[in-house]
Amino acid sequence: MAAITVRNLDDKVKHRLRVRAARHGRSMEAEARAIIVEAVGTEEEEQNLLQRLHERFAELGGVDLDIPPRNSKPRVVDFD
């Protein structure tokens, strides 16, 4: 496991971390670790918007749409 050192931490921030750690019944180090893990998240959470929407509405089922055939050729664009 890796170790990091946080320098120049404001005394007020350190105090709030100590209070928060006590509230959760753990050491300041364990609390800081939990905060970092929550902030960084996991790879599973790093999905793009389409994946999240698909998962959210998957239970509703899909919709099959008829795609109309292309009968005409694309129009010519005149840049003059």
Image (cartoon, rainbow, N blue to C red):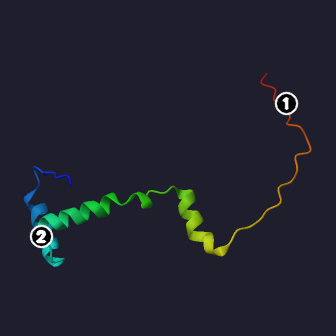
Determine which residue is flagged by label 1.
76
Residue depicted at x 51% and y 55%: 48
Name the spot of residue 76 as percent of width and height, x first: 85, 30
Say above or below: 54 vs 25: above
Q: Nearer the viewer, residue 50 or 74?
A: 50
The kind of residue tagged 2 is Ser
Residue occupied by mark 2: 27
Residue 75 in which image quadrant = top right
Count all numbered tags in the image, as a single digit: 2
* Tag 1: amino acid: Val
Residue in the image at 88% along x and 50% along y: 69
Q: Residue at x 14, y 64 (%)?
A: 29
In x, y percent, where is residue 2?
Answer: 20, 52
Horizontal relation, residue 35 to residue 63: left or right: left
Q: Residue at x 85, y 37 (%)?
A: 74
**Disc 2 to disc 1, how far (Cα)?**
70 Å
Which image quarter holds the N terminus?
A: bottom left
Q: Dot 2 lies on which element? A: loop
